[in-house]
Amino acid sequence: MNDLINKAAQLVARSGRIVAFTGAGVSAESGIPTYRGESDGLWKEYDPNIYANIDYFKKDPTYFWSFFRDIRYRTLVSSSPNAAHNALAKLEQMGKLHTVITQNIDGLHKDAGNTNVIELHGNTRVIGCLECEADYDFETINTRIKTQLPPLCDKCGGMLKPRVTFFGEQLPAGAMENAAYACANCDLMLVVGSTLAVFPAASLPMMASRSGAKVIIINLGQTEMDQVADILIDGKAGEVLPLLL
Ligand code: APR
């Protein structure tokens, strides 16, 4: 492990245009469960075709909103950045990292201080109306769902949903274009805490590699793109990234 970290540290030292690409594993040490991780995979217990699928949501939103109220909310609201998030923020302060591309919806990279964060799958802290596009904050809706499930829009009575990308939905406008541009213009991509199983997000490390960037994958366990990595470190993000720094 130390030899791998030293090799990775040399790449980081030589790089000036680093892009980080993160998944749920970077937030695991903040207490937010991953989706497919061995020990805490949310989708092992809750079927994403019911709890994170737009067609099912429109058919019966009470499943998602009960899951959000009883399970999801408490880990999201009580979480704060961990050593992995803080290390990526430090890399930006050092002028080495210019973009974080994240699949996560928890907002922790911005909380840690990274200023250029592309949230490919949106952000759960904003709840929006599917009809009139009105936005509501997380706390307002979390209070409301104690008495009104599913929550409805004050303005038009429409259905409310967190501004996150459900399966079957398009990614936020411009997200993939911005992410692809960052991948084409970096000299190193740090992939942290993702199985690289969900497209189009998972195509980005290959895109960076094909643009000539080196790719370091830091993940607990295998990913579906291990072959793309120039350096593969099987370890916890909150331990490896500070050592890398
Ligand atoms: N450090 C590093 N990696 C970790 C840690 C940790 N402390 N803890 C867990 N992991 C690893 C897990 O072993 C797993 O391989 O992080 C990976 C997380 O993978 P997933 O749970 O599949 O999460 P992610 O890749 O972000 O999922 C992509 O799928 O359901 C959709 O929209 C959702 O954005 C999500 C997308």
Image (cartoon, grey):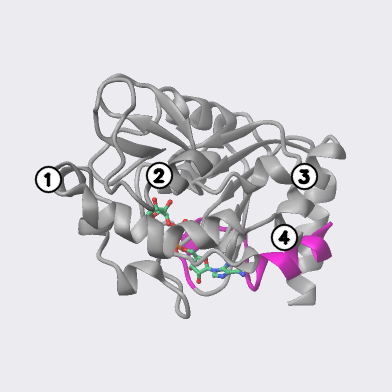
Name which residue type carries label 3: Ala
Mark earlier in primary sequence (4, 1):
1
Vertical placement of residue 24 versus 203, above or below: below
Pick whichever, 31 or 227, lies toward us. Answer: 31
Q: Is mark 3 within 8 Å of ligand 1?
A: no
Residue 47: quadrant of the picture: bottom left
Confirm or deny contact between disc 3 and disc 4 (CB under 8 A).
no
Location of mark 4 (residue): 82
Residue segment shown in magenta: 222-245
Q: Secondary structure at mark 4?
A: loop
What is the CA distance from the residue labelled 2 to the residue labelled 1?
Answer: 21 Å
Q: How far across and how far down the image is residue 64, in percent?
A: 28, 54
Task: Give the class, few, some or many, for how many residues have Cα within 10 Å of label 2's Cα (few <14, many ≥20).
Answer: some
Q: CA distance from mark 1 to mark 3?
A: 40 Å
Q: Nearest the camera: 68 or 211?
A: 68
| Amino acid type, mark 2 | Arg
Quickly name the residue at label 3: 89
Q: Nearer the viewer, mark 1 or mark 3?
A: 1
Identify whether 22 is placed above or below 225. Answer: above
Q: Secondary structure at mark 1?
A: helix
Q: Quadrant of the N terminus?
A: bottom right
What residue did someone put label 1 on? Answer: 59
Left or right relative to 150: residue 41: right
